[in-house]
Image (cartoon, rainbow, N blue to C red):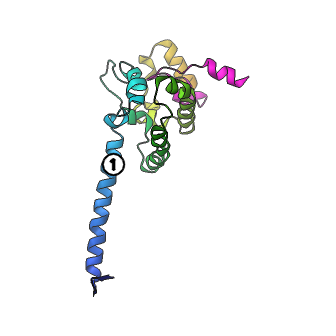
Amino acid sequence: MRFIGRKLPLKYIVLVAFFFGIFATVGTNKFVTYTNSETFCISCHEMADNVYQEFLDSPHDVNPSGVRATCADCHVPHEFGPLVMKKIIAVKDVYHWILGTMDTPEKFEEHRLGMAKVVWAYMKESDSRECRSCHKGEAMDFEYQDRSARRKHQSARQNGMTCIDCHKGIAHELPDMDEEESSDE
């Protein structure tokens, strides 16, 4: 490799590559951390005025234990590979934000069921991986659950069900499901 007419020694090339690698790693980590923050997630009014307002005072926001989930806790995988794939797929959200696909409450509601179905399918496919980051099935003490919850959780475990099979609408309002029934006809 040449630098202004001089051949650079290999040790300088390695040194530059090393520092570039550190810079790229730190920069990527900072970017991912920022885009996983609640501040970033609700920076557009579509989220701040709709789903974030629903999330406030939900069991994932306020609860007896004081444990609070943020947007990324439920919507972004914690493992590196799935996290990177989720970030790549999320580029479509930026594209639709630029186009103004959901820039009014009416447009948002028009797309709400479709967006919910995508999230539900993803959670079903991943066996509710993000839920299980906090809620460990093997750590559930059925004796402390009321009879109905105990019966349902034990049945779900025996039948290979996943969290999203029963817990749609736990942090956000359910979309108008009548729209789904009319589209199935």
Q: Residues within 10 Å of mark 1 (few under 14, many from 20)?
A: few
Residue 44 image point, x, y percent: 38, 33
Residue at the right extreme of this rendering: 185
Residue at the top extreme of this rendering: 147
Quadrant (top left, top right, bottom left, bottom right) of the C terminus: top right
- Asked which secondary structure carries label 1, the reply is helix
Residue 13 image point, x, y percent: 29, 77
Task: Please tell me how many numbered marks the rendered image carries.
Answer: 1
Q: Which residue corresponds to mark 1?
A: 31
**Is residue 65 magenta-colored?**
no
Is 133 placed left or right of 14 in the picture? Answer: right
Is 99 placed left or right of 176 in the picture? Answer: left
Q: Is residue 168 visible?
A: no
Above or below: residue 168 compared with residue 88: above
Residue at the bottom extreme of this rendering: 6
Residue 28 image point, x, y percent: 34, 53
Quadrant (top left, top right, bottom left, bottom right) of the N terminus: bottom left
Q: Nearer the viewer, residue 106 or 165?
A: 106
Q: Residue at x 54, y 31 (%)?
A: 115
Q: Residue at x 26, y 66 (%)?
A: 19
Residue 84 image point, x, y percent: 44, 49
**Is residue 174 magenta-colored?**
yes
Q: Residue at x 50, y 27 (%)?
A: 108
Q: Nearer the viewer, residue 38 or 136?
A: 38
Q: Is residue 12 visible?
A: yes
**Residue type, label 1:** Phe
Q: Which residues are magenta?
A: 157-185
Above or below: residue 87 compared with residue 181: below
